[in-house]
Each structure stands twice: as C-alpha cells, then as structure tokens.
Image (tube, rainbow, N blue to C red):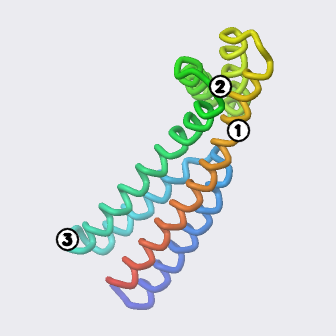
Amino acid sequence: MDASFEILLECVLFLAMALTTLSLVVPLFPGFVVLWLIALGYLFVVGWQGWNLAFFAVLTLLAIAGMLADNVLVARGAAQGGASWWSIGLALLAGLVGTFLFPPWGGFVAAPLALFLAEYYRHREMEKTWASVKGMVKGWGWATVARVALGALMTLVWGLWALWT
C-alpha cells in the first residue's frame, strides 16, 4: 500500500473514531459497534497476523466492556437507590422495548417510568420510589462517563496500533 494513502486512511479512521467517541455521550448511537467495525476494517487492511490480532482482540474486549458497562452501571445505580432486581429488570426491558417502539427517546422515557411504577407498586411510598429513580439516573451519569472513557481508550489503543504497523 502506498505510504501517503496509508497515512490518509489512518487520519480518516482516527477522525471517525474520535467523532464516534464523542457520540457516546448520547447513548442513542451504537458507538461501540461502530468503533469495533472501524477496527475490523483496519484489520482487513493491515492483515490478520501477529500484533494486529492482539490489538484487535484488546479492542474487541474494550467494545464488549463498553456495551456491558452501560446496563451494569444503570442497574447498579438503581439498586443503590433501593430498587429491587425485579424492578430493575422490568425497567431495562421497558427501556429496550421503548427504544424499538418509539425511537430515539422511547427508552429514556420507558425505563425510568417502568422503574417508578414497579417501585411505587412495591413500596406505595413516594420517597423510596423516587430514591430508586434517582439512583437509576445517577447510574446513567456514571454509565456516560464509562462509555466516553472506554471509547477514548479504544481510540487510543487503535492509535497505538496504527503507529505500531
């Protein structure tokens, strides 16, 4: 491959990764899938051998961690707010269904609403119900921090990979 083309390709891919990382602030865009696909495309360009596979494996693990971190941190926040695991599961399911039925904002409305209704049914007390919802929102905040940090780490690892090859 021509050296100038390779440099141009790496600059374009880096820009795409950086912009995708910024998009992770709003969890409506499948940013980790896009970051992983960029890395996969780069792997096809540089070849499936040696260190290329090692860098790609690290990026794959980071992408999986990023996708899991969102749900884990939101659930953890709700649990710390006092929500039951049954209510949390219902909220996550409602968020998933809401996202598909009423994109892009359906999940943002459905998840806390389902948690609120389930916890109110459980406690019949507004203070405990709101504590659960506030915990979920706090978890969303930490999930945003984790998504952006893991996206930035993926971009950094990819940059090191590009420099290595």
11 over 34 or under it: above or below:
below
| In the foreground, 155 or 150 | 150
Could you tell me which quadrant the C terminus lies in? bottom left
Task: Find out whether the residues at labels 2 and 1 contact each other: C-beta distance under 8 Å.
Answer: no
Which quarter of the figure has residue 54? bottom left
Q: Number of labelled discs? A: 3
Image position, residue 25 (x, y; %): 66, 54
Please report whichever mark, 3 or 2, sits nearer to the chain's N-terminal start.
3
Other-residue count near label 1 (Cα within 10 Å), few / some / many at <14 / 14–19 / ≥20: some
Residue assigned mark 2: 98
| In the foreground, 143 or 94 | 143
128 over 6 or under it: above or below:
above
Q: Residue at x 42, y 72 (%)?
A: 157
40 over 10 or under it: above or below:
above
Q: Amino acid at mark 1?
A: Val
Q: Is residue 7 left or right of residue 22?
A: left
Image position, residue 56 (x, y; %): 32, 64
Other-residue count near label 2 (Cα within 10 Å), few / some / many at <14 / 14–19 / ≥20: some
Please report whichever mark, 2 or 1, sits nearer to the chain's N-terminal start.
2
Instruction: State the CA–CA distance, disc 2 to disc 1.
Output: 17 Å
Please report whichever mark, 1 or 3, sits nearer to the chain's N-terminal start.
3
Q: Amino acid at mark 3?
A: Gln
Residue assigned mark 1: 137
